[in-house]
Amino acid sequence: MSPPSVAEDPAARPADRHWRTDTYRRLTARLETVVGDKTAKPFETLKVRTVGDLMHHLPRRYFSGLELSDLSTLQPDEEVAVLAEVASARAFNLPDGSYRSTKKPRLEATITDRRGSLTLTFFGAPRLIQYWAKQLTPGARGIFAGRVKEFNHKLQLAHPDFVLVDEEGSAVSSGVRNADLALASRAALVGLYPATGKLRTWTIADCAQLALASLAGIADPLPDWVREEAEVIGLEEAFRALHQPSDRSEIDQGRDRLRFDEAFALQLTMARRRADAAAHGATPRRRRSGGLLDAFDARLPFTLTAGQVEVSEEIMGELARPHPMQRLLQGEVGSGKTLVALRAMLAVVDAGGQAALLAPTEVLAGQHFATITRLLGDLAEGGMLGAVEHATGIVLLTGSLPAAHKREAMLRAASGEAGLVIGTHALLGTGVQFADLGLVVVDEQHRFGVEQRAALSAKASARPHVLVMTATPIPRSVAMTVFGDLETSTLREIPAGRAEVSTVVVDTRRQPGWVDRAWQRVVEEVGQGRQAYVVCARISATAKTAAGDEPAPEGVAEESDQAPAVAVEDLYAELSTGPLASLRVEMLHGQLPSEEKDAVMGRFAAGETDVLVATTVIEVGVDVPNASVMVVCDADRFGISQLHQLRGRIGRGGHVGVCLLLTTAPEGGLARERLTAVASTRDGFALADVDLEQRREGDVLGARQSGVRSGLRLLRVLDDADLIGSARGLAERCIAADPELSEPGLADTVTFMELQAAGDWLERT
Ligand code: ADP
Ligand code: MG
């Protein structure tokens, strides 16, 4: 799907002509058309630009205008709205003619709810102080909103917004100019909006009132039957319930509706994509016997696992169909996904097409190229003089290749001489063409967005088949959300002959001697002919995190005030002159020039280097079977899945592996818990569960695959799995009954979602 042209300027709003319903026209009306330019301006900082944006900007809390809030439970830094009575008020430093104070005039009032009390302070010109003093007379009741601060061991609110109310809870006067005096009276509950700087919660409430008025009488975009089955209230009703509720149960209903809308819009979009893909033709690539694939299989030094056979059949079956395959292949690190993908690629070549493999980093693309070239042997020498029968050409295409190489690779891809094209996102470049692209394999999907997949698909005249591989086990609800347009296959077993890896957490604070022991262990393993990885969270002492093309460690906020992590450059210097001086040590990280990266990796793969001190650049897919030890420094800086991926680099060649996780993280903390979990099992699916429990939503979805995320405000992909499932069912029924989306409300819902995703995509690139 290419982004609609209106989204080229991310700030531009979809014009009216996009909308088939009056509802979406009103929802996407710019805010200033309803509240005026001046009032709309400060909303920019909240990214609230339209009436609909404002309707989705929800109060963080609600408070009742009639009940007294509990002043005895306030905490410093809490943002509160309290209903209380003024006990006393006193002005300080007011000029009284005879004597002129040099101090700032100030009003101090004490409010109470009979359970506790709180000081309010106001500074200002004498005139203002007098004005406030007149309002805040003892006995006056009001709602006071602001952030609680501790001052001289006492809690206070400085310059709170306030509305005074009468016995019935109606507002009688206000401390804020232009505030709607009826605020507290028009609903029994008042929402407290997350306010920023100049934009007060009262102003937002006023604007929400105007926005609601502008939406009066809108038709619901959802068909009645969907609303009934989903058991949700109407849209206008939901907006009113959230911005001007009369009781708390309404708020929940309003939230439920908006949450359903998010899930439904997403699933409708996915269902539409699936239907669209199914409606599109793809060239069937039928498996041909006696060709390249058979020749390759005959040479394989091992037998396929049952899972590999099963998934391969599934894939071959789909490749033979006249519709594009859209499949996600998930499986443990080392479960043999790459091999499955390669066999699919060879089948496509046999059927006369080309296959492209897209890798997330240059190192990984280079590795794939080397591994596949090696596995194929002379079967990869197609186009060369004296090539064996069935041979095809293979090229590597990455951004940092010398121009001449790149030109040649592009030529061989465009002419069709190369049946296999392996590369990074450079493959997405506009100059890259294929003679007949039949299959796109995307490795480690979590680093590619939906749109990048689409960009590569667009390079084929007919839609290519698509296979996406990921080593991160994905819960079903996330899969349905992020990869909702894909079917899923899973490889559960690890090929036989995979060795044990024992993992030990080393507390370097309590067992300092163990660090030396770790290096000693490295020396011993190398003495046995093995190789080792040492992984650091940072490249250099000056860089804050690992940079370059490797993924940044998924450290969590709790550790942010720790001492800086050990850096690759420092540790490399230390080890190669100290404990590992007798070994051949090299370093690898994303900031090295790519030829150097390739050379370092090449020497390590060839066994010319004993120890590689590296960043997470080695996390993904690097395959050196002789490596048996891994030492991870500051292991607590990494996420569970990252550690699991890293550890997957050892124990690959049948040699028993050992993985040492060095940490200073205290026992009992979350970080330490992660390490203990990683040490206790090598089952990626079990670890994914622990991971999900610990991680927040955004981390699970990942920033980069957030093409669909911008639409998610209330939906919690993990917690709302059931909701997502039922939304998916309803969306499928809508699309089945109405594949062309002639229902205007549904059509607009999908258009809106796609415009949002496209806008996001443009902001990212
Ligand atoms: P993944 O991509 O899932 O991490 P790979 O396809 O890279 O896994 O496989 C990991 C290693 O296991 C490679 O060295 C590969 O050659 C080897 N391998 C793959 N399938 C088998 C098998 N059926 N039996 C033995 N080794 C295998
Ligand atoms: Mg792999």
Image: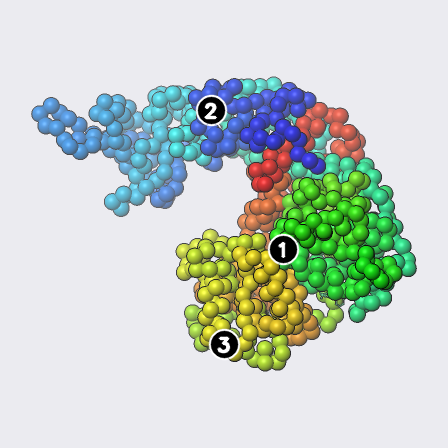
Residue 158: image location, x then y, percent = 30, 35
Q: Residue furthest left?
A: 98
Kind of residue at badge 3: Ala
Q: Kindly state the secondary structure of the residue where label 3 is placed.
A: loop
Which residue bears the numbered disc 1? 362
Label 3 near ligand 1 (CB < 8 Å): no
Front disc: 1 or 2? 1
Q: Nearer the viewer, residue 109 or 635?
A: 635
Q: In which quarter of the image is the C terminus?
A: top right
Residue drawn at 48 percent across, 72 percent down:
575
Instruction: Please identify the quarter of the rendering in which residue 458 is found.
Output: top right
Kind of residue at badge 1: Glu
Which residue bears the numbered disc 2? 40
Instruction: Please identify the quarter of the rendering in which residue 373 is found.
Output: bottom right
Dot 1 and dot 3 residues touching (CB under 8 Å): no
691 horizontally vs 738: left or right: left
* CA separation in Å, label 1 and label 2: 46 Å
Sequence-first tag of 1 and 3? 1
Q: Nearer the viewer, residue 475 or 42?
A: 42
Residue drawn at 66 percent across, 75 percent down:
655
Residue drawn at 17 percent across, 31 percent down:
93
66 horizontally vs 450: left or right: left
Q: Residues within 10 Å of mark 1 (few under 14, many from 20)?
A: many
Residue 263: image location, x then y, percent = 65, 38
* CA separation in Å, label 1 and label 3: 30 Å
